[in-house]
Image (cartoon, coloured by chain):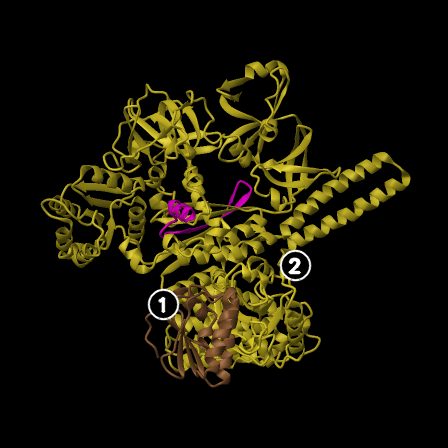
Amino acid sequence: MIDGEDDLIAEYLTESHEHLAHIESDLLAMEGAGAPIDEKLINRVFRAAHSIKGGAGFFNLSRIRELAHRTETVLDHIRSGQMAPTPETISVLLLVFDQLRHLLENWRESNEANIGEYLEALNGLAGQPEGAAKAATVHIEMPVSSSRLIEICQVDLEQARRGGRTIYLLEYDLLQDQSLQQKSPLELMRQLMRYGSILAADCDLERVGTLEEQSGGPLVFEVLYSSAIEPELIQNLLDVPPVSVHVIDRQGTLQPLALQSPANLKVQAAPEADAVATARAASREASATNGEAQTASAPLPNSRPESTIRLSVTLLDQLMNLAGEMVLSRNQLNLALEQKDFAAIEASAHRLNLVTSEMQAAVAQTRMQPVGSLFAKFPRVVRDLARDLGKKAQLEISGGEVEIDKTILEGLSDPLTHMIRNAVDHGLENPLQRKAAGKPEMGRILLSATHQAGQVVVEIADDGRGLDGEKVAASMVRKGMLTAEQVAGMNETEKRLLIFLPGVSTAEKLSNVSGRGVGMDVVKTNLDRLGGKIEIDSIVGRGTVFRIKLPLTLAIIPSLLVSAGGRRFAIPQNVVSELIRVPAGEVAQRIEWTGERPVLLLRERLIPLVSLRTILFGEELPAANSAWQIVVLDTGAQVFGLIVDALHDSIEIVVKPLGRHLKGLADYAGATILGDGRVALILDAVGLAQRAGLIAEAQPLNNRAATAHSESSSTRSLLLFENAPGESCAVPVEQVRRIERVKPTAIQYLGGRRTWQTPQGILPILTLADRAAVGQLDEDQQWVVIVFEQGGYSRGLLAAEPLNLLEAAVELDETTLRQAGISGSFLLEGRTTLYVDLAELAGGEQGLTAATLSHEAKDGEAAAGGEPSEKLVLVAEDSDFFRSQIQQLIESVGYRTIGAPDGEAAWQLLNQHAGEIQLLATDVEMPNLDGLSLTRRIRGDSRFSQLPIIALSSLADEEEIERARAAGVTEYQVKLDPDLLLNSLTKTLASQPLVPA
Amino acid sequence: MVDVPAEYNRIVHLEEDVVAAHCNRLRELLRAQIEAGANQLTLDFREVRMVDSAGIGLLIATHNTMRRREGELALINCSLDILELFRTMRLDQHIRVEGKGESKR
């Protein structure tokens, strides 16, 4: 090897890693693109192999050079078209580049590495196009009895390592382990399989002894195990902790894992066995035949955080400047102290203060990393898993440039991997099921990161089968983990969140319900540690969105100090919108009362008030003859005033997490230590609002009429309102964020959509009549806007007073008045009341669900709804209601439509507008000429043979779908799924030239 | 508890779970069978619902004893749970296990 060239080598390694960084995505893109090779892609991959080869030759790294050279040969074949980038070829290339990366990381030992099988696999490719990696086996020695070996195929081992999983060798003593007396071995096995997979296992039969030996030896059971759980966690996660845990590195050698909690281990046999194991492993490492020099505290594979970080020179210069400033200030301070010049001391302390803040900001900046570096590994995770499962999945990534603190980014890796895998495994259906549900075979997973209100929001959305909270809850009840009463009090959101309970993953039958929940408690634990919050939105049959909200940085946040009841509390500055002191003399005028709740009139808005003393200590409100100190908090979802005893400084606090026993308290976000050494709790504005029951009451409502049977489990809390005069409607209260009165003139039409200007921004406004055949609001009514949240966005529903809040037993009739946006009707005090489905109402609007969001991004111009598009869609449908629904829906995304009541009329229109109509959406069963006959006629005419036809039918059976396909429809959908229709519509039309040739 | 259809192939019908509480009794029973000269010992698990760690130990010890005598141990009519246990632990690579209704080799 070379001496004195370390700097050069370091440079070569950095450059090689940069080349390798994008290799996965490039290879996957090549695979996705298929036969006509994208020259740019292949050249980039080729260049990577080439430059790795060049450097390796220079530094005499013969194995790296050889492997890179053979890779280059294969890539050359692909470039020249001699070989196709089949999934098999790409798999081999991915493995080879993994190995190259590994060899580069351990370049000192790379010349001794065995790369035979990789070369063979590459030769197989180059020689015969169908060749695949030849199976090679790895032998893993048992730590205790080195005579025994576990044998496993190299490819299996590599597969098992995918997606950041770690390979462990777990060792149990099934006889001596006390905890196994509570748990059967079968439960132990099932638990292991829940958190990972068992690659191989073996029992040391000899040591058990025979029937003659009265007290047999230990029953040693060893498992080769692959799991996404990190080495630090594995001991604590498994109910029955193994006697020893070893991590298997890429050479197949064992790395003993420092045991985290020796207290968990069983005393009897463990110490001896463990000592032996460690000693053996250590001696083997020392005499490792492959000459691998052990670095003393070798970091564990897969949990290795990056040890270097790239910094912009500007930032570094800035840091250097600040450090210089700091030294200067210190010198000044020293001088001033010597001279006891207090004015100078004060001045330099002030200066030091300033420089420290700037320094802190600059250092924090160095820790910010784009999430793209983490996201980059997921396309491969999705690809590999989808292949394993026989599914089709496509990962779309956006927001990779969003930056987040390095620590958070690293902590995010495991939970995110788990969730992405879950989305493929359990979220997406298999191609057959998708086809039957009228979805494209290719499932989509959208991974995005955005900045929102001082937080980073990471979304994992899939268009799969969705997560049914009811079913999750029902299965919890069945298993006795919750009572029916507990579940009855939960809303859909809360029910979905049940999947994060640790117990859920013990459910064998959960896969029949929804499949989610496998290890989701681990995800939750990890995210909690990062200060993250997770939300789930899901529509059964359409998909699921997991939304993780993370702080930008864990370290230091500016906060406002307040006090109440003699204690001090910190409120993060990002939720504080203003501070108000109502003098003693003005309390009576400025504070109004709605029922029990005081509200503050602030610039024509009514802001509900909550007293911190009342929430925390159950005390009364401050007296009306004293001044009220109010902190106005804005959580994004609601604005409210918090009455405190006193306001103090605004300071920067270092956030410390709360202890485990306090962690469940929604009122607090953490704790901090103040300058005087006292502890102050950090208030969580959202938690406080929930605790105070503020979710639905921000405006005066008519008195709460609680009906007598409010305790019954089938009762729902409803907000009643009117649509058109006399048209009584209801929504569940828990979906309502707030309600505000508006004047009809305040509702504006912007960009083809109804909007309302609020202090927070422009709120899109919906009306029931947008989707359902109901009356319009009358200008004489008092209009209100019911603000709700859907898919992470606020929306307003235009409604009219009188409003009423009540609890009522709802017996929903889901047939008679069922239509889009209205889930049915029920009788309330003798009046028929429409039960409004806000999610469905908003779902018809574009841009709400993840699926539509992503195509909106692609077809911005079409979906923006600004300029009416030239593209014309013909809608053939005999039901006037459905026809107008479909037309409205299509027009809402900016296309023009014309309607026909039957197939014959549609044919005539098509002839009149030949060359103008870009797509036909047709019902199947229609008078005169049915949809399929219409399709056949169209396909028989050369002018229209390429016209995209979407069949919309109420029939969903396979036979019908097959018949439609045979007739020539492009797509078959069960009506009416607005998202699905818009999705395929925009997709089809975006790829169409304006007028077909 | 025992029926002996053939001299050297003994089928033992177990009527209780193979768990720690029964292990001493079972150990004596099995030893007696082997000492009586069985070189093919088949345990009928039709009634067995559970096997715990001690039970696994006992079965392995029986297997070891049989091996020394160049005999073989087999478990038949195992429930799905017990099959799952033996297969997951890869014990089926050493001891022949069959589920309910599976044809004998």
Chain B shade:
brown
Give, as a three-letter code, the residue at label 2. Answer: Ala
Give, as a three-letter code, the residue at label 1. Answer: Gly
Q: Nearer the viewer, mark 1 or mark 2?
A: 2
Provide the letter of the chain coloured yellow.
A
Look at the picture and state if A308 lies above or below A884. below
Relative to A467, A249 lies left or right = right
Residue A679 screen position, x and y as percent: 70, 38
Image quadrant assignment for residue A965 = bottom left
Q: Residue furthest right?
A: A339
Is any atom of residue A594 visible in this view? yes
Residue ID at (45%, 40%): A486
The foreground one among A171 and A972 is A171
Query: Numbered disc 1: what chain?
Result: A
Specify which label sits upstream in the sequence, 1 or 2. 1
Do dots 1 and 2 share one subunit?
yes
Tell me the CA gap for discs 1 and 2.
Answer: 55 Å
Residue B14 screen position, x and y as percent: 42, 70
Magenta segment: A451-478
The foreground one among A459 and A802 is A802
Q: Secondary structure at mark 2?
A: helix
Look at the picture and state if A41 lies above or below A341. below
Q: Secondary structure at mark 1?
A: loop
Is any atom of residue A119 visible in this view? no
Residue wearing tag 2: A263
Please identify the quadrant where the N terminus of chain A is shown: bottom right
